[in-house]
Image (cartoon, rainbow, N blue to C red):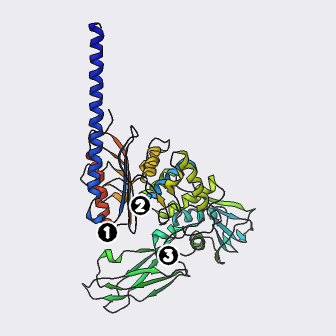
Amino acid sequence: MSTQKLRRLVVAAAAAALAMQAVAAWAGQATNLQERVSRLLASPNLAGGIQGVVVRSLRTGNDLVSINADLRFMPASNMKLVTSGAYLSLVGMQAPFTTRVVTASRLDDNGVLRGDLALVGGGDPLLDTAALKGLAEAVKRAGVNAVSGRIIGDASVFEEQRYGDGWSWDDMPYYYSVPVAGLNANENVVRVTALPGRRAGDLVRVTRALAPPWQKVRVTALTAAKGAASSLNIGRELVHDVVRVDGALALEAPEADRKPEPISVEEPPRYAAWLFRKCLAEAGVAVPGGWAAGAAPRNGRTLAEHTGAAAADLMKSLNKPSDNLVAECLLRRIGLVKGKAGSAVAGRTAVTEWLKSIGVIDRDVAMFDGSGLSRQNLVTPRAIVTLLRQMHGAPCSAAFIDSLPIAGVDGSLRNRMKGTPAQANCRAKTGYVMHASSLSGYVTAADGEPLAFAILMNHHNARNAQAMAVQDEIVLELARATGLGRP
């Protein structure tokens, strides 16, 4: 063998040895990271629960941590990652929700519309008083001075099921569990404020913003002495629009005890119709008739139209505050656009097919709603990370990633991981229902390695703050890590 050939063999062998050492070092780093995460999950606060964690390099696709990766967990609001990813991928960026004002009635020479006027919902979860005022002013500009008939709220774009499968009945009075409709207004809530009476022993005083006339209030709450503990409870009777205020509110109670409580309305289309009638009156359009939920005329003409938020803004309204109404309307919109109906069932079917197309197998996801309120939802950590990697490289990735809360900055992560390497670095979706807590998203390691992670925790008795503390520590381990990239 020639000297030159021998030299080439020696160089090749040395290079191979160095490569093997680098691979071994990388594997050691990954193993050490998994061990550190496992130690954090051994927190006594999580005893008796089941935890799953997957951490994946977005550059290589390698899993750096895999703990119970294929077990199915209740994801809580991590289900919104599935809903928002599917919506952006299936419906797209250029299809806003549209609300219309429709009539088939004749407008006489005095500007009187001789019949009903319909407010036709497009499923917009963000339709509010400002938008309704704009529609009312447009109706006035169209020459309408009065409506002889009623205001009809048409929610037929979505099917009638107002609550998700597996939702808890005792959540239904509250803002996070409002009924879902094809016509919504002001997030389908009335804001109720209680104030102390003049002296101890008096009933508390109650005010409501934009409350419909059929909503009743039952107050049994009493004013407590100055300095006493407040125990105020504001809720709503199921099936009926009756607000209940009980407990006690101390004289000079701090502002935190007196903040408005958003309470759900029972019939969103009826509420929207009443609110629109009010806006019409303010715009100078008299409506002596009433309001009701119903169907718009099929051959009606459009007098005014409101275009809802762009998809990127919808995603921020969904994920940063973790808005359940937005999630449920998006799921039904997916069903309307890609399925057979504006229903949760049609939406779930379309989302499941999309998940298959990105490599998530059937058994890894059981989807029952779009928000994560349902305790029937199940998903594996591996499925969440597969979705996160897909969305990271998708054409709509900016809208998806920008919608996620930023650690220590905004949304549901604004008070977490402040002053750490994860602040303004980690973007992730939180999630919580009783005995289930989750955090999944993106973070960049100290050496620049981009990572996707899913942390799902179920069946523990810990307070959510204790579960979140472990999640934050895991993310900090990822943000501080070095040497994770395969050579």
The C terminus sits in image quarter: top left
Secondary element at image label 1: loop
Q: Which mark is residue 321?
A: 2
Give the amino acid at mark 1: Arg
Task: Classify residue 34 as left or right of residue 298.
Answer: left
Alpha carbon of mark 2 to alpha carbon of mark 3: how far? 22 Å
The residue that appears at 31% across and 63% down in the rendered structure is 467
Disc 1 and disc 2: Cα gap in Å? 20 Å
Residue 126 is at least partly visible in this image: no
Q: Nearer the viewer, mark 2 or mark 3?
A: 3
- Residue at point 44% right, 79% down? 235
**Quadrant assignment, res 205:** bottom left
Q: Mark 2 packing: few (<14 Cα in 10 Å), some, or many (20+)? A: some
Q: Amino acid at mark 3?
A: Trp
Task: Name the spot of residue 437 as percent of width and height, x first.
Answer: 37, 62
Q: Secondary structure at mark 3?
A: helix
Quarter of the rendering containing residue 450: top left
List the residue tagged with mark 1.
463
Of the residues shown, which amino acid type is indicated by label 2? Answer: Pro
Residue 169's disc number: 3
- Between 437 and 419, the residue placed more toward the observer is 437
Q: Evaluate if marks 1 and 2 touch, with contact meaning CB atoms under 8 Å apart.
A: no
Q: Quadrant of residue 470?
A: bottom left
Residue at disc 2, secondary structure: loop
Is residue 183 visible to the viewer in this orientation of the structure?
yes
Q: Position of residue 149 (x, y in %)?
A: 70, 74
